Amino acid sequence: MGEPAGGHDPVVEPRDPPPDDPAPTRRIALGIAYDGSGYHGFAAQPGQRTVAGELAAALQQMTGRAAVLTCAGRTDAGVHAVAQVVHADLDEAFLADHYPTAGLTPGCELVALAGALSAQLGPETAVWRALVAPAGFDARKSAIARRYRYDLEVAARPDPLRRGAVWHLETPVELAAMRLAADALLGEHDFAAFCRRPPDRPEGPITRCVSDARFVLPGDGLVRFVIEADAFCHQMVRSIVGALVAVGIGRLRPSDLVALLAAADRQGAPSPAPPGGLCLVAVRYPEALTGTWS
């Protein structure tokens, strides 16, 4: 999903635990950050190096059991995250043996588990939190909002140190026009014009509710677009950024973005922005289900 859709199916690794295995498990929530440049996206894919594939392999090596992973949002190849959230049901006996001082009650932080996974997955991926999840927690279904940022580098020449983390634009942009266009995204809309449709849904509305959509200037030549919604469909943020940049360089008017939303048709929409500038920065849950991860 240039970026993930909150409604996408959970990520399932190639080999599930045997259905008749009686060993009790405990659900563990993981906070993960990764540089997506070297991965073929988050979701496991045969023959491809993915974040989920690497994480599942690390968990299996540690526990001796295949891992079934569910994430808050499935990012595409080249997309980054500082606050991806994943859950896995791990063998209770393994956890009790290896982390006896942490306890297994909901809310317990498994600092040593996070550190062990980071040591295996680094430097491209870091597990910055491991938590015994409360009852009912699901990394995808329990999430009430996801937040992304997209960084544009507007400069005469690119900064090689930011390669893979920004979309470099040599042409100046009209930020006021881009902000006006971004305002049209707020609220509940059919975002079919900005989504790559899944094969099982070739028609019909793709409704999402956007609670925040704005540009900020963090300095050093960056223009940052921040967007938060209850969920995202495939390539939604990258497609929106592609349209906003078209407004910024004068190829579209702010009203054209309104027209694209109303048309609910991807035909005629600008191409999606490159994946490297996109990053998942926060996932929000009800407070009783671990609150905000960012």
Image (cartoon, helix red, strand yellow):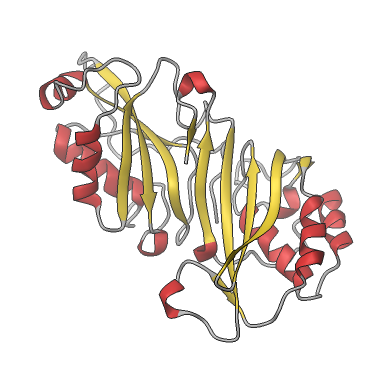
Please give left or right for residue 253 compared with residue 74 in the image: right
Q: Nearer the viewer, residue 201 or 290?
A: 290
Q: Is residue 83 left or right of residue 105?
A: right
Against 194, residue 100 (above or below) is above
Residue in view at x 51 percent, y 22 percent: 287
Point 42% across, 38% down: residue = 85
Q: Where's residue 87, x and y in %?
A: 37, 31
Q: What residue appears at the point 39 percent right and 36 percent down from the top-left corner?
A: 86
Left or right of residue 87: residue 233: right
Question: In this image, 192 relative to 102: left or right?
Answer: right
Q: Position of residue 281 (x, y in %)?
A: 50, 48
Could you tell me residue 81's position as x and y percent?
Answer: 44, 51
Q: Quadrant of residue 13?
A: top left
Is residue 268 visible in this depiction of the protein?
Answer: no
Among the 4 quarters of the image, the one containing residue 242: bottom right
For residue 9, above or below residue 250: above
Q: Residue at the spot x=33%, y=37% of the render?
A: 129
Furthest residue toward left: 97
Q: Is residue 70 visible to the viewer in this orientation of the structure?
A: yes
How far across and down, in percent of the image, does residue 291 sit? Answer: 49, 27
Q: Residue furthest bottom?
A: 156
